[in-house]
Image: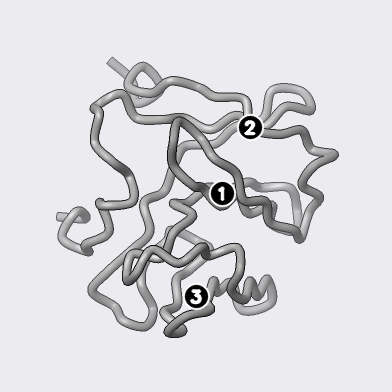
Amino acid sequence: MSAEDDVKWVEVATLDDIWEGDVLDAEVDGEEVLIVHLPGGELRCFQGMCPHQEILLADGQIDFETGVITCSAHEWQFSMDDGRGLNPKDCRLFQYQVKKEGETVLVGVPLDGRLRRLRHRAQQDA
């Protein structure tokens, strides 16, 4: 079974809703997500709430030049590459699968029933 078989694909937006160099926050399957449209066209999708105190990351600073997402509350920082914690390093953002079908942006919601916003510890990498 492939990783794509383990998710439910949810239509979230169109490319007109999120241009390159922009972010979009949305609710997907009851949870906040943050979609990042990198310059060059690649899309990334992460949990939309900071794992520290569940502050909406879309309200923070999104710096495409450095590739860093910074929470507005306590300045926790995460990499746009893979959601790993930069400050502090012992946490990370859950990263969703994301794909384009034509002009439509879809997010892959895991079918295991766990809340994504609670999967923030770095040990999930092990």
Type of amino acid at the residue the image marks with label 2: Val
Q: Which residue is mark 2?
A: 12
Q: State which mark lies toward you, 1 or 3.
A: 3
Please indicate whether residue 40 sits to the left or right of residue 75 in the image: right
Tag of residue 66: none
- The image quarter in which residue 82 lies: bottom left
Please indicate whether residue 70 sits to the left or right of residue 123 in the image: right
Q: Which residue is mark 1?
A: 44
What percent of the width, then of the height, locates residue 98? Answer: 54, 36
What percent of the width, then of the height, locates residue 101? Answer: 69, 23
Type of amino acid at the residue the image marks with label 3: Cys
**Within 10 angstroms of label 2, few (less than 14), some, or many (20 or more) residues?**
some
Query: Residue 115, relative to residue 68: is it above or below?
Result: above
What percent of the width, then of the height, locates residue 88? Answer: 31, 81
Residues 54 and 84: in front is 54
What percent of the width, then of the height, locates residue 10? Answer: 54, 24
Type of amino acid at the residue the image marks with label 1: Arg
* Residue at 34% over, 30% down: 110
Q: State which mark lies toward you, 1 or 2.
A: 2
Mark sitting earlier along the chain (1/3):
1
**Quadrant assignment for the N terminus:** top left
Q: Which residue is mark 3?
A: 71
CB contact under 8 Å: marks 1 and 2: no
Q: Secondary structure at mark 3?
A: loop
Outermost right residue: 16
* Residue at 60% over, 29% down: 106
Q: Secondary structure at mark 2?
A: strand
* Residue at 29% over, 78% down: 89
Cα separation, mark 1 vs mark 3, equals 17 Å
**Quadrant assignment for the C terminus:** bottom left
